[in-house]
Amino acid sequence: MKMTEIAIVGGGPAGLSAAVSAAASGARVTLIERDDHLGGQLKKQTHMFFGSKKQYASTRGVDIADILQEQLAKYKDRVEIMTDATVIGIYEDGILTIEQNNKYIKMQPQRIVVATGASEKFLTFPNNDMPGIYGAGAVQTLMNVYGVKPGNNVLMVGAGNIGLIVSYQLMQAGVTVKAIIDAAPRIGGYLVHASKIRRMGIPILTSHTVKYAHGKDSLEKVTICKLDEKFQPIPGTEQDIEADVMCISVGLSPLAELLWQIGCKMTFVPELGGHVPLRNGEMETSLKGIYIAGDVAGIEEASSAMVEGRLAGLCAAKGLGYEAENYEDLRKDCLEQLNSLRSGPVGEKILKGLSKVTA
Amino acid sequence: MRIEEHPILSFKKGEKIKFSFDGEEYEGFEGDTIASALHAAGVKVLGHSHNHNRPRGFYCAIGNCSSCLMTVDGEPNVRTCTEKLKSGMVVETQKGKGVLK
Amino acid sequence: MLQNTGIPTKEDIAGVTPSLERRSKGPVAVIECYQKIPCNPCYTSCKFGAIKEFKDINDRPEVDFDKCTGCGQCVVNCPGLSIFIIDESYSDKEALVKIPYEFLPLPGEGSFVTALNREGEPVCRAKVVKIQNAKYQDRTPVVSLTVPKEYSMEVRFFNIEDYFSDNTYVCRCEELTMGELRDLIRMGYRSVDEIKRISRAGMGPCQGRTCRQLIMQELAKATNQDMKDMPMTTFRPPVKTIKLGALLGGDKDE
């Protein structure tokens, strides 16, 4: 049985930030990541981040991943990093089970921060299982991690931030984006992202959906159609778009299996992307010692995920008696940052969702 | 299908790796996953579904879904979107669900 | 509507446009950020205090155009790439538009590209006069284009392909290109006749049968005229080339 003080599940923006603040407080930390490198989805973000200096605004996501790892390296005497390691279970007695390179490892931590992130939602239409139809995140991984183009002509489904950003990244990789469609009557992502793509001549068709995907072994053509105010297809508005790639970018769901397993109180909050755990102001769930941070706590931007991570790491460490020197200031700063990131119109939905899960 | 130049990222191409896919020789680079190497070579169909025999490519690329399972070096159900490519690997389209040995 | 299409309306744009007077004085930042989002690098990166203080991180940027020097620091710091520098003092007829451009290949300095509007539609030919790509810009190069002054608030992107290039021939007899025609119009030639006299387009063997319509269309577009109101060229015989001998021989019946 491996022992550690704080186990952090997931090495993305939230998990890395939690590891930094927990280790800085003095705790022994084990960071467990299923991929062979840390950084999570940050590694795939070629664009500059929004927010303010404290959340590394104007720095590209891919570079933020490196910055967080450098911060963590300062505490390497008390940080253990396990990559290629997937937490496959958390049990009532707080024991974690991990698979790493075909080995089965048990671990007993005193605190757990679950920062597992999210998975991509799927969409229903005939032939939606055809090769050539990918999650937008998958295309990002293929392009920006492995340097491989997904195809030649792409139809992007979803005009939220991910759909808009991945469209831009596709153009940067030299791939043609034929159109971005979204069932909603309004563009969900930041309008500056939308304008940036529109001025390259890419149409953004709101109130449109996929009717049918065509192809023999893989995607060749997509029929789209217009929707009325009740999201019903309008007959006669069908049009065909020649595309060998379709990206599905219709939102994310919190990856919360581990929290269900251990028995955290969960509730369904559509504003936060699905089932999420109840939590207190310290990011602790209904179970003592089990903390959360990032998309698993509710789908938001990476900037808030990082701040939540800081907060969870700080509080988890304090729970073990490792109180950071300026703990109260740091905690307040995290809360202020989160408030400010969520204070505008785009944060309204998040705040509404959080009001349902915060004790 | 490789990105030759990128305005933001620089890709460090590793050593060339040879592997086989359904009996034919293919090439990838060190750092590739099996699925990324196949995709770069233009292979989009990685297998067929068990019940309705529908073509399957990868979908999530991070090991969440089951769309990219293949037989690798005789072992079935390998998630090829996260499994790193190694020299001499024998990659095959999987027939059936695989058997316990 | 911006929220349905990604294209800002005229009113949206009017709300962020510096006055004509300010624009003609020299370079100035135009921030096309119309939505309250949690983002403030434009404000924190401005060394001249030209962007009013953000009371809330969701505030929209408001530029004090008198303080703005058009240095371009905010252009490369804006995560939304929504800031442009406009300089209408560049020359008599042309304005400079600076655009952040994160794509490869970069155009060459001195080359011509196709300037696009906010919908990605071609507007005019533009010359690339400068590319800034210093280390501090962190892989967001800024491309300076010259465009006719009237397009300074319209051009917001470009295609590296030169749609309006010299390879587009308007008059094949006298070899007048679209670029040359546009230059003439910009210089003040305002009728088909004037264009004809300065360029010889329409005076070749075909006598304007190929080029006349194209020249009129371009003139109408560029000078905002209706074709039906525009003066036509003077038509004189012969309508086709004939041998001088035929003329010399006279009419046998005469």
Image: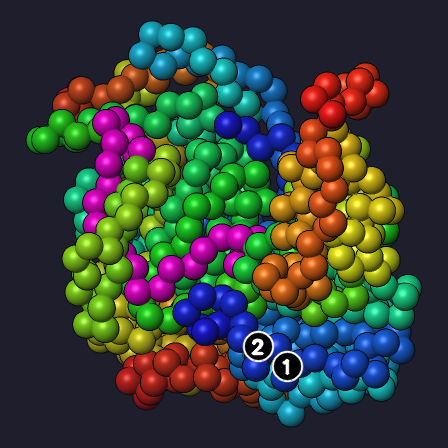
Pointer 2 residue: C10
- What is the chain identity of the residue bearing mark 1? C
Read off the magenta span. Answer: A197-220
Q: Nearer the viewer, residue A134 or A315?
A: A134
In the image: residue C127, left or right of residue A258:
right
Disc marking residue C14 = 1
In the rendered image, residues at marks 1 and 2 fall on the same chain: yes
In the image: residue C31, left or right of residue A97:
right
Q: Residue furthest front?
A: C254
Position of residue C145 relative to residue A185, above or below, is: above
Q: Position of residue A255 (x, y in %)?
A: 32, 59
Q: Residue at x 78, y 22 (%)?
A: C250
Q: Is any part of residue C39 visible from this angle?
A: no
Position of residue A231 relative to residue B87, above or below, is: below
Position of residue C65 relative to residue C252, above or below, is: below
Q: Residue A129 is drawn in which quadrant?
A: top left
The amino acid beneath tag 1 is Ala
